[in-house]
Amino acid sequence: METKSIQQFMNSYSVKMIIVSGLAILLLIPSFLIQDVIRERIALSQTVKHELYAQWGGKQVIAGPVLNVPFLVSEPGENNQVNSQRHGVAHFLPETFKTEVVLFPETRMRGIYKVVVYEGRLKLKGTFTQPDVSQLNLQNANYNWKAAYFTIGVSDMRGIRNLPELSINGQKCKVEPGVADTDLFESGMTVKANSLELKQPMNFELDLVLNGSEDLSVEPLGKTSEVTMSSEWSQPSFTGGFLPANREVNAKGFTANWTVTHLNRNFPQQWNDRKYNTHEAKLGVELLIPIDHYQKSMRSVKYAILFIALNFIIFIFIEIKSKIKIHPFQYSLVAFALLIFYALLTSIGEHIGFNWAFLISAVAVTLLISWNSFTMLKNVRMVAWIMLLQAGLYLFLFTILQLQDFALLAGSIGLFIILTIVMRASERIQWYSEE
C-alpha cells in the first residue's frame, strides 16, 4: 500500500513538473558549452584574419604632411653665459588640406574564413602658409631651417605599393622611409626640405597607393580640411571623430565627404615637441562584412531556454490531455535534439553560410523531434501540433536574427504573444482530478 502511494506521488503531475523544470535548467549547461565552442571558433577566425592582414596590410591611418623645424633654446645664465641648452622640434600644420580617396575592396578567403581587404589610392594636396614662429612663444630659440623636414604618417608601411614623391611648389622631393621624430607619428615617411625655400607659402601634392584591411582613416590636419572617400563597397561604417557632411550609400557603393576646420579639433596649427596628440581627430570608413554566422549563432544559442521550456510545456500538456506517460529521459532526448540544432548551425554555417545552415538544421531537428514524438504518442494529430510548434519557433528565431535595430522589440512582442498562447492553452487543462 505504501509502495503504491509512493508510486502515485512520483507519477503526479506536480512532481513531474518539478522534475522537468529542474531538468530544463540542468540542460542549459550544454548550451553554455556550445557558446564556448562558438567563442573558440570566433577567436580562431580572428587569428586567421590577423595573419592575412599582416601579409597584406593592416588598418591604415594617413596623416600629414607636417612641416618640422628643429630648434635650439639657450637659457642664459650669469654674465650672459649659456646656462643650459634644450633641443626640440617645432611642428607646423598645413593651412589647407584636401584628400581624395578611392578604395578598391576585395574579399579574400583563407580556408573557411572570409576577410575584406582593399587597395587605396589617395591624392593629398594643400598649402602651407609662411611659418610663424612667434606663435610658439619660445624665448631665445634658434631655428635650423636647413635641417627642416616634412613627415607623413602611415600606420602600416608594409601596405605601400608605389614610390610616392612629395611635390612642393612643383619641385619633387624624395621620400625616405621612417619618421625623423616620433612626436606626431610612430611610423611613416620623411621628406628632407634641403634647398626648399620654407619661409614662404607652399603648395604640396602627394599620390599614395597602399594596401590595407577593413579600415582606412585620415587625420584632417589642415586649418581647413576636405576629405572625400568613395568605393564600390555597399556596406560602409563611418568611423572616427567626425561623421561625413554628405554621404550616399547604395547597392553600387558609397561616396562620402567631410569638411573639418581647426575649430573642430583640440590642437592648434603649430606647437613644439609632444605637446599635442592628433590621433583623436581622425576620420574614416570601415568596410563591413555583414554580421557573420558566428555572431548570429551566438545570438541564437541565447534562446535555448525558450525552446526547451516551450517544448517541455507542450509535452506536459499532452501528458495531461492524453493520459500518456512520458519519461523524464524522453524529455532529455528532446532537449538534446534542440541543443544539437545549435551545433549543426555553427558547423554547417562555416561552410555554406548562415541562412542555408539554419534551414538545414531546423528541418533536421524538427523531423527528428516529430519522429521521436510519434514513437511516444502514436498520434498523428499531436505530432502535427508538435511539428507546427517547432516550425513556428524556428521561424520566430530566424526573423529576430535577421533584424538588427528592431530585434529587441520584435523579440519582446513575440515572447508576449507566445506567453499569451500558453496561458490560453493552459485554461483547457484540467489540473486537478475530480476525485
Image: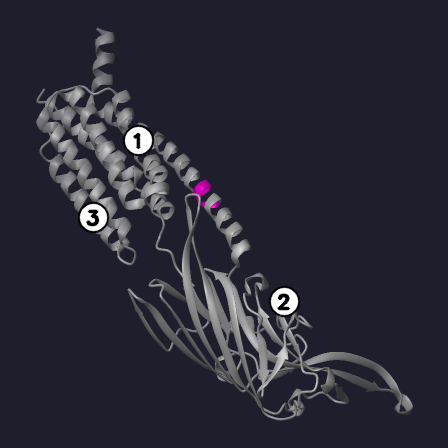
Q: Amino acid at mark 1?
A: Ala
**Label number found at residue 24:** 1
> Please, is residue 242 above or below residue 289 in the view?
below
Q: Bounds of the magenta span?
A: 39-43
Closer to the eye: label 2 or 3: 2
**Secondary structure category for the residue under label 1:** helix
Q: Residues within 10 Å of mark 1 (few under 14, many from 20)?
A: some
User: Cβ–Cβ below 8 Å for labels 2 and 3?
Assistant: no
**Label number found at residue 265:** none
Residue 4 percent coordinates (x, y): 21, 9
The prevailing secondary structure element of the residues shown in magenta is helix
Q: Sequence-wise, which precedes: disc 1 or disc 3? A: 1
Q: Which residue is mark 2?
A: 186
User: Cβ–Cβ below 8 Å for labels 1 and 3?
Assistant: no
Q: Which residue is mark 3?
A: 414
Q: Residue at x 52, y 57 (%)?
A: 56
> Please, is residue 399 above or below residue 152 in the view?
above
